[in-house]
Amino acid sequence: MNPLLSYLESLFPLELAETWDNVGLLLGDPQRAVRNVLTCLTVTPEVVAEAVEEQVDVIVSHHPFPFHAVKRITTETLTGKMFWDLIGAKIAVYSPHTAHDNAETGINQQLAEMLELTQIEPLTLTSGRIGLLPQPVALTELVEKVRQSLRLPHVQYIDSGKAQVSKIAIGCGAAGEFLEQAAAKSADVLLIGETRFHTYLEAKALGVSLILPGHYASERFAMERLADRIATQFPDLRCWASKREREPVQVR
């Protein structure tokens, strides 16, 4: 196996991925030499165009491409066109996804450390994180810390009404399913990328505040950090986070 792929699997063991997930090398030759590597959150037409123009050998995409089984690959569909372009340029795709979320140095751990949590442990058997702030703070102070840490113009949140918060649960991306576990472990706050409207109401009823920086913001930073890790580990490789990938949600 290519040394880059072995390195990624050592960072994010694939057995940590959720059973429903599609992770690992999803497109390409595991033995092919690698010179140029691009990381991104999601494979999109913009990312594919950048990869082709920059003669990338491997795209490391957090979200799987493909995620679901593909029965037909033609240029008549968006997915088929991207596949056709990637295969034509001999560009491989590797996705760690939930293995990256759950790993010892993965996204949820990085978010926990970003908030300076102590006594950090998995929220469930293998997923998420939960820990304590150094000292209790007002929810709005924590929201501001999240906003600054992720370099965002704004952050959505749901206030359950507690004067101060100290126990924080974390699940990057669309992790509303962690609410039940967060409440069971007496978390004051659940930090997740996004969730459904009814989860907002359920969280408020359970006394758990939500901080919602957005799906993109809760994960893209880690792909930028991963590009730096790869570049440090393999000085002979050219590796960067996609320059064309953007947050798809705009606010006026």
Image (cartoon, rainbow, N blue to C red):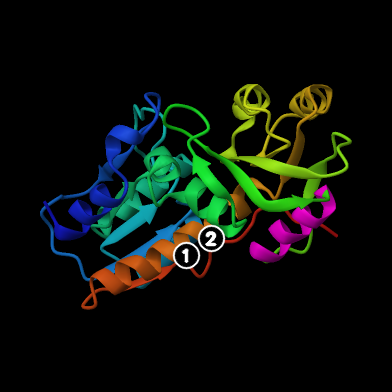
**31 lies left or right of 247:** left
Marks 2 and 1 in Cβ contact (< 8 Å): yes
Q: Which residue corresponds to the image point at 77% horizontal and 64% vertical from the top-left?
A: 153
Q: What secondary structure characterizes most of the magenta part?
A: helix
Residue 67 visible in this rendered orientation of the protein: yes
Q: Which residues are magenta?
A: 139-150
- Considering depth in this image, is 124 or 135 the residue closer to the camera? 135
Measuring from the top left, give residue 176's x and y in whole percent. 64, 30
Residue 130, labelled with which disc? none
Q: Quadrant of residue 217?
A: bottom right
Q: Quadrant of residue 37?
A: bottom left
Q: Which residue corresponds to the image point at 68% horizontal and 28% vertical from the top-left?
A: 186
Measuring from the top left, give residue 89's x and y in whole percent. 27, 60
**119 lies left or right of 9:** right
Residue labelled with disc 2: 221
Q: Quadrant of residue 154?
A: bottom right
**70 lies left or right of 189:** left
Q: Amino acid at mark 1?
A: Glu
Residue 149 in the magenta stretch? The answer is: yes
Label 1 neighbour load within 10 Å: few <14, some 14-19, many 20+: some
Residue labelled with disc 1: 224
- Considering depth in this image, is 38 or 12 the residue closer to the camera? 12
- Considering depth in this image, is 188 or 34 the residue closer to the camera? 188
Measuring from the top left, give residue 222's x and y in whole percent. 48, 58
Q: Amino acid at mark 2?
A: Phe
Say which quadrant the C terminus sits in: bottom right
Residue 197 in the magenta stretch? The answer is: no
Tag 1 secondary structure: helix
Tag 2 secondary structure: helix
Residue 55 visible in this rendered orientation of the protein: no
Question: Marks 2/1: CA distance?
Answer: 5 Å
Measuring from the top left, give residue 188's x and y in whole percent. 73, 36
